[in-house]
Image (cartoon, coloured by chain):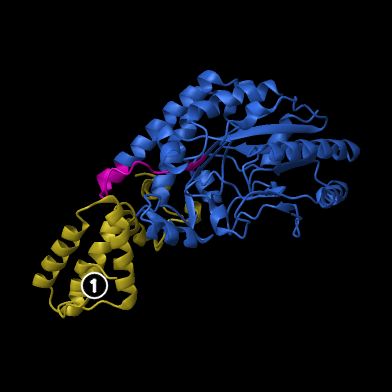
Chain colours: A yellow, B blue
Amino acid sequence: MENKILHLIFSSDKIHLTQSQKNFIKETYEILSIFDKNVDKLFLQNFNQITETAKNKFHAGNFFYKNIYKLRYPVSWQKLAKLKKFKKYNFEFDEKSLSENLSEIDIILNQL
Amino acid sequence: MLRKTKFITKYNYGNEVVDLDEYVVAFSDSCYLNCEYCYLKFSKTPKLPVIYQNFNKFESELKELLSLSKEKIFYFNFGETTDTLLSEQHFNCLYDSVLLISNLAKKFNKLCFIEIRTKTKNIYKLSKPFIFQNVYTIYATTLSPQEVVNNFEPNTASTKDRIESIKYANQLGMLTGLRFEPIILYPVEGIFYKNVVDSVENVVKSYKLLINEIFQKVNVKNLHSVTLSCLRLTKKQFKYLLDKKSVLCHFEMLLCQDKKYRYSRPIRVTIYRQLIEHIKKVSPELNNRILLSFEFKYIWESCGLKLQTLPQLGYNYAT
């Protein structure tokens, strides 16, 4: 059964989410709930802020999804954002394959 | 029960994972220790532990392997499909198997290493010495901080007992393998970035204390190898544990190319680097005996480790 908060978000006409985005959000909600009792509040707060300011329901959907992604991966999202300039979109590769500054990449890939 | 499939198989590590070149011996299947992360619950194994009775099949597979293979050194893992020392029947079968391996290794001029992997302290029930020609046995106890044992390995021996049992295994003539597997990010301090950093720092701290304790009590001369591996979960396990709301399902786990979830790379490498550095500091002679289990080549290299296999470590023992 769908949780109340998720039901409220998924059934809102202020936000458009694809099915895969909904699945990700649902899974993230379930995982984060194991570790933090205030996940309801966090999700609702995010939803309210975004729907108040977004241009339309599509923008709202994308912003909300991105925010939930950041909540789910507090380490990875920052690191992956920095990796984009090297045209890499995940961590699992040999950094020596890049001809860039290895110490800069080492900080992104191998350090917290 | 008779084993229908092969007793001896080359371990399949998975896509892109560094191959440690070990053979798994499935003399028994299943386990009742019921560790929360154990993959055996999800594999096609009998519900209750079984010892396979068709020893002659094992013998012919072994004979074929040792006689036809060009390899000089073999590493057999007896603790992949069960806990090697789970019951008295396990000991007896293990003993018979080691004896057989020794006889055939002598005949075909091979050197064999046999890993006895356990989370029990049942070694004390063994009284016969484990000294055989052409064979070294390695008592490879899995080591985790007591808090992890309490929460995820409920039916196993305490950390203290596992460390103590190493000394007894050495008295029986076994070498030691320290297996820091799986390293679990626990306790989880919270869901935000700082909480993750704090959790990692705490895990590293508790493993450093554990390493200090081990090296105060264990004779380094008997150490064959040290392996490290962070928790990994199959997709099926991840889903199952998530349904059970298990804290093993960490939010910073990502699916890797071998289709297993692992903590994201910055977390894994941070843990490995700090523990490797600490082990080298506490015991510099182990410099070339530290391996990563189930990790990718670039992770080894990021941790400053030279790629090597378990049989390669055996050259130190070859005369």
Image-quadrant location for residue B242: bottom left
Judging depth in this view, the residue of A60 and B280 nearest the camera is A60
Image-quadrant location for residue B202: top left
Query: Within the magenta stretch, is there residue A33?
Result: no
Query: Within the magenta stretch, is there residue B182?
Result: yes
Q: Please state if B247 lies on the left or on the right of B58 as rendered.
A: left
Judging depth in this view, the residue of B219 and B298 nearest the camera is B219
The correct choice, above or below, for B267 with respect to B176 in the image is: below
Q: What is the chain identity of the residue bearing mark 1?
A: A
Q: x, y (%) of residue B232? A: 48, 51
Residue B302 showing in the rendered view? yes
Callout 1: helix, strand or loop?
helix
The residue furthest left is A52
Residue B110 showing in the rendered view? no
Which contiguous range is marked in magenta?
B181-197
Say which amino acid is labelled 1.
Answer: Asn
The N terminus of chain B, quarter of image: bottom right
Q: x, y (%) of residue B309? A: 66, 43
Judging depth in this view, the residue of B149 and A91 nearest the camera is B149
The correct choice, above or below, for B158 with respect to A110 in the image is: above
Q: x, y (%) of residue B268? A: 43, 45
Q: Please state if A25 lies on the left or on the right of B281 as rendered.
A: left
Q: Which residue corresponds to the image point at 61% horizontal and 43% vertical from the top-left?
A: B307
Residue labelled with disc 1: A62
The correct choice, above or below, for A48 with respect to B102 in the image is: below
Q: x, y (%) of residue B303? A: 49, 41
The C terminus of chain B, quarter of image: top right
